[in-house]
Amino acid sequence: MQSIGIYEAKSRFSALVEMVEQGEEVRITRHGKEVVRMLPMRRKPVITDEQIARELEQILALQQTVKAQTPGTGAADSVIALRHAGRSQA
């Protein structure tokens, strides 16, 4: 960790950014009091390979439990049959 005054930080900004990119923490002070803390970015993957594999396994397991609907038994077919029955009564 490095502490530096604001005036000096202005003149050495590019060098300070390079230090932070290399993992160093930089604190900028004004009149001896810390006003800015520069920290390196911690980039973590959004999702790991293990999480992807686990999710795919769960999807495959779900697909195996879902039964394919045979034609004529689905909800859309039921609605069509009810609509047709209602029209024939009119």
Image (cartoon, rainbow, N blue to C red):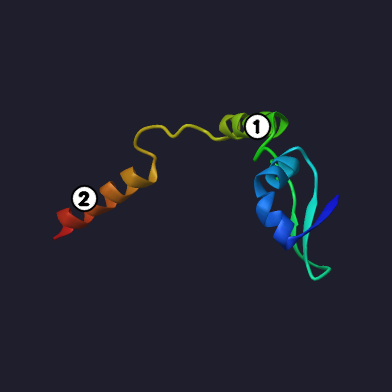
Quarter occupied by the C terminus? bottom left
Is the residue 13 above or below the residue 45 in the image?
Answer: below
Mark 2: secondary structure? helix
The image position of residue 25, as x and y in percent, is 80, 49
Q: Residue at x 17, y 58 (%)?
A: 89
Q: CA distance from mark 1 to mark 2?
A: 46 Å
Q: Residue furthest left?
A: 90
Q: Which mark is residue 84?
A: 2
Question: Which of the two discs, 1 and 2, sits closer to the camera?
Answer: 1
Callout 1 amino acid: Ile
Q: Which residue is mark 1?
A: 52
The image position of residue 1, as x and y in percent, is 86, 50
Q: Is residue 27 left or right of residue 84?
A: right
Counting residues from the start of the chain, the first of labels 1 and 2 encountered is 1
Callout 2 amino acid: His
Q: Is residue 33 left or right of residue 70?
A: right
The image position of residue 55, as x and y in percent, is 65, 35
Q: Residue at x 39, y 41 (%)?
A: 74
Q: Is residue 89 left or right of residue 2?
A: left
Q: Is residue 61 left or right of residue 39?
A: left
Q: Residue at x 47, y 32 (%)?
A: 68
Q: Nearer the viewer, residue 39 or 7?
A: 7
Tell me if label 1 and label 2 are in contact, CB under 8 Å: no
Is the residue 53 above or below the residue 23 in the image?
Answer: above
Q: Nearer the viewer, residue 60 or 33?
A: 33
The image position of residue 13, as x and y in percent, is 67, 50
